[in-house]
Image (spheres, rainbow, N blue to C red):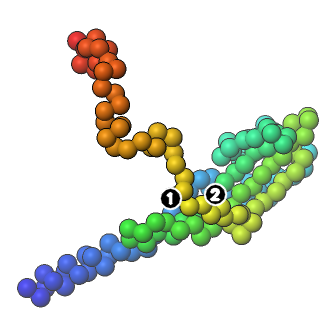
Amino acid sequence: MKKILIILLLLIMASCSTQIEKRGYIFNEDSQKKLSEGMQKVEVLSLMGSPSTTSSNNGDKFYYISNKFYKYAFLNPREIERTIVVIGFGENETIKTIEEYALKDGRVVDYKSEETVPGGTEVTILQDLFDTTGRYTSSEAIAGSIF
């Protein structure tokens, strides 16, 4: 009996192990060092690969985003590292600026979820249930459209 209890205890402890998850773009230090102002957009794509996202609002920009999360058991993952490389292009599609941001450069937006009312949830459950009664004919029903 004690052996089974010890084995179960060890299995439970092993399931609570920590993990480091990497998400997003995987940076290559050699590729980053080769970036320089005046480089063509096509050269950047061949060197760095496709960006995580792009923007054309404040000029043409490529964003390469990488995150590391600390995950423990069933708890929500906690972000421990973030790297964002922003490459801005000029009019002739050459690199104009290269910027790098880290987690400490970010801003945390604090919001209260209990004050946010998403659309469609202003009614009660009963109103939601009886709202659709009488709206559909038998030909418009799901079963009617299948047969």
Q: Quadrant of the C terminus?
A: top left
The image shows residue 130, relative to residue 144, as above or below, that is below
Please say if the residues under marks 1 and 2 sit with CB atoms less than 8 Å apart.
no
Q: Quadrant of the N terminus?
A: bottom left
> Which of the 4 image quarters holds residue 22?
bottom right
Q: How crowded is mark 1: few (under 14 residues within 10 Å), some or many (20 or more)?
A: few
Q: Which of 18 and 42 is in front in this view?
A: 18
| Numbered disc 2: secondary structure | strand
Horizontal and vertical percent position of residue 75? 42, 69
> Which of the 4 image quarters holds residue 84?
bottom right
Identity, as a three-letter code, of the amino acid under mark 1: Glu
> Which of the 4 image quarters holds residue 68?
bottom right
Q: Is residue 116 left or right of residue 104?
A: left
Q: Residue furthest bottom?
A: 2
Identity, as a three-letter code, of the amino acid under mark 2: Ser
Q: Nearer the viewer, residue 64 or 46?
A: 64
Kindly identify the residue that appears in the image at 46 percent across and 66 percent down.
76
Residue 131 at least partly seen: yes
Residue on which the image places disc 2? 66
Residue 46 at least partly seen: no
Horizontal and vertical percent position of residue 67? 60, 60
Marks 1 and 2, how far apart in space? 31 Å
Q: Which mark is residue 114?
A: 1
Kindly identify the residue that appears in the image at 13 percent across and 85 percent down.
3
| Numbered disc 1: secondary structure | helix
Q: Is residue 1 left or right of residue 11?
A: left
Horizontal and vertical percent position of residue 2? 12, 88
Q: Earlier in the sequence, mark 1 or mark 2?
A: 2
Q: Is residue 13 left or right of residue 6?
A: right
Kindly identify the residue that appears in the image at 38 percent across and 68 percent down.
74
Figure label count: 2
Q: In this view, does 145 lie to the left or right of 21?
A: left
